[in-house]
Image: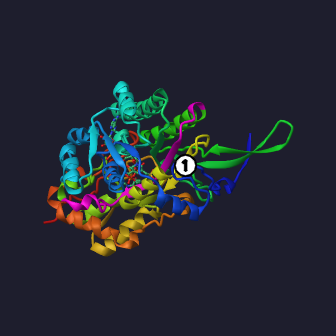
Amino acid sequence: MILLVDSLGSTVVFSFTASLGRAVDGCAMQEMITTCNPGKVIVFGGDGFCGWPTALHLSELGHQVIIVDNLSRRAIDIELGVESLTPIRSIGERINTWSALTGKEIKFHNIDISTEFAELLELLMTEKPDTVVHFAEQRAAPYSMKSAKHKSYTVRNNLCGTNNLLSAIVESGLDIHVAHLGTMGVYGYGTAGMALPEGYLNVYLKTDEGEMVEQEILYPTNPGSIYHLTKSQDALMFQFYNKNDKLRITDLHQGIVWGTQTAQTSRDERLINRFDYDGDYGTVLNRFLMQATVGYPLTVHGSGGQTRAFININDTVKCIELAVNNPPALNDGVQIFNQMAESYRLIDLAKMIADRTGCQISHVPNPRNEADENDLIVKNDKFKGLGWEPSSLADGLLQEVEEITKRYSSRCDISKIPCESTWTAKHSPGRPSMKVDAAE
Ligand code: NAD
Ligand code: USQ
């Protein structure tokens, strides 16, 4: 029986001893990061919003990068009748451009990791990567809730993909570090008065003899969508493969990513990163900034009292660099980092953007089954201990998104802005009540 839960588990002592970036405290870690040898990295999902800039960032740092992607995200754009606001190029043009500009080769393989196990295994056996970064999942909560078909696709794609990757590594017999992109949403967004720890929680159990015993458990999951549910289930698979097969695994519980370009993607128009603004794939801060640009009222779901964790795309790529350079030791448990910079209430973000731009705010019906208000305090000490200095909204990064949305505003289809996907039949789409025309 769990008697008492407190925040002791949140102060996880840093003690990883890893094969590449072995370190024991903050200073030593910083030193290790800079001296770490670049290795071979497969970026699964490397054509996507986070994966593409990560692939370029790692390539720039000297890693040998291979992208695996089945281009399903591009196919979903076609299914939804939308396009990235930014004119992204084909994966072939992207990697040829990178090679022409830098002389660095990035290989590409079109493999569906949820169904093509033999191809996946063969690739691992041929390339023998040091690390795989796993972004290759269906990542939109609204898309996962659109219909029974979309729920089923998301579960199949994400769970079979993760399982195939882990079991292919076991099958290969190779020692490969898996860095997986998970989500803050596995925790739910309630904090019960304590800062959310990094993955684990210390609890006290009362034995039958009345003795108190301390145990470390995975923080109880509380997913808010089928998509988030798959990330909770991924976490269980990581625990199992780590226990049974001693796989080295880092699970990164990432907040909502915002921003578009990184130092590498902004080097040439043909390297531009994708920017989703539609009701299924657009995430809230990028959507609000885009809506302000095209004169569409900011679609705050309900009161806007929801608090969420955010991270800029430039910090995403830095955190992944740190995760790649600091794998857990062979017999360590699954290493979990909270990959977020800061938390904001949605209504405060909307007001901040309205103050900057003079745009309107519309409190639309909330299509999701979620708490109208929550507090969210999150620990992110582990990445900070590795030398990461998170950037904040105040660092001028909003401007980057504003410039992008202005430059490509003519590509926006405003009919695709409202969130139409509802969590239950009782919920309503997040449409503003007034008719909205695009700004000239
Ligand atoms: P994305 O949809 O832009 O990229 C995912 C990529 O994976 C796509 O290019 C897609 O084609 C590919 N893919 C999907 N299923 C695949 C399969 N079975 N085989 C091969 N390739 C496959 O998403 P993103 O925003 O880059 O997110 C990447 C990861 O980061 C996801 O796992 C997501 O859950 C996580 N994450 C994203 C955010 C965010 O705000 N974008 C926040 C937290 C966590
Ligand atoms: N929201 C609005 N108005 C909008 C769009 C969204 O108020 O126009 C609200 C939503 O109701 C929700 C919040 O904003 O309360 C966040 O929604 P989102 O679409 O920005 O983010 P979410 O669905 O949580 O998913 C995104 C990524 C996902 C990642 C997750 C991290 O798509 O891959 O896992 O962020 S986290 O939110 O921390 O779980």
- Do we see residue 297 in this rendering? no
At 57% from the left and 43% from the top, the residue drawn is 334
Residue 265 image-quadrant placement: bottom left
Q: Residue type at mark 1?
A: Ile
Residue 405 visible, this orientation: yes
User: Where residue 431 appears, x then y in whole percent?
Assistant: 29, 53
Name the residue furthest right: 209
Q: Nearer the viewer, residue 311 or 440?
A: 311
The percent position of residue 51, horizontal first and vertical second, equals 34, 48
Q: Quick one: label 1, few (<14), some, or many (20+) residues within 10 Å?
A: many
Write the residue at 20% across / 40% down. Answer: 78
On the rendered structure, is 150 left or right of 440?
Answer: right
Q: Is residue 412 left or right of residue 244?
A: left
Q: Which residue is mark 1?
A: 336
Element carrying mark 1: strand
Residues in magenta?
244-268
